[in-house]
Image (cartoon, helix red, strand yellow):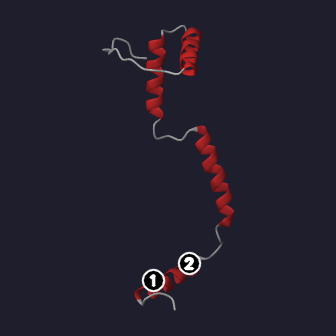
Amino acid sequence: MVANRATAKVTFTLDKTAVTSLEDAAARLAMPKSAVVREAILEFHARIGRLGERERINMLRNFDQLIPQIPERSADSVDRELAELRKSRRTGGRR
């Protein structure tokens, strides 16, 4: 943590679980509660936009389920189908 930063006094309302967790963390780390809150905010901010472990595992599980569903087709087969779709759209759709 960087020392000698300018500080601002702020007020937050926390539920009992958060207060208990804050007090426990401060006691276990032998740090002031304000230092625990500052560090927690900086760590949380650094993780914004990154996947959490649960999200990552869930996305990998979904990926593993979808991969077997991808049909094995040649690139030529796909290109032919796309060409047919484009042609049908230009002529008013499939009939």
Question: Vertically, is 73 above or below 43?
Answer: below
Nearer to us in this view, 12 or 81: 12
Give amino acid for label 2: Val
Q: Which residue is mark 1?
A: 86
Residue 30: image quadrant is top right
Could you tell which of marks 1 and 2 lies nearer the N-terminus?
Answer: 2
Task: Tell whether 41 sits left or right of 73.
Answer: left
For mark 2, what is the residue? 78
The answer to whether residue 87 is left or right of residue 26 is left
Task: Nearest to the eye among marks 1 and 2: give it.
Answer: 1
Q: Residue at x 66, y 51 (%)?
A: 61
The secondary element bearing badge 1 is classed as: helix
Residue at 49% across, 21% down: 14
Whole-percent x, y for residue 23 in the image? 55, 12
Expressed as whole percent of the image width and height from the top left, the position of residue 72 reads: 66, 72
Q: Is residue 47 above or below residue 69?
A: above
Viewer-side residue, 51 vs 95: 95
Residue closest to the eye, 32 or 1: 32
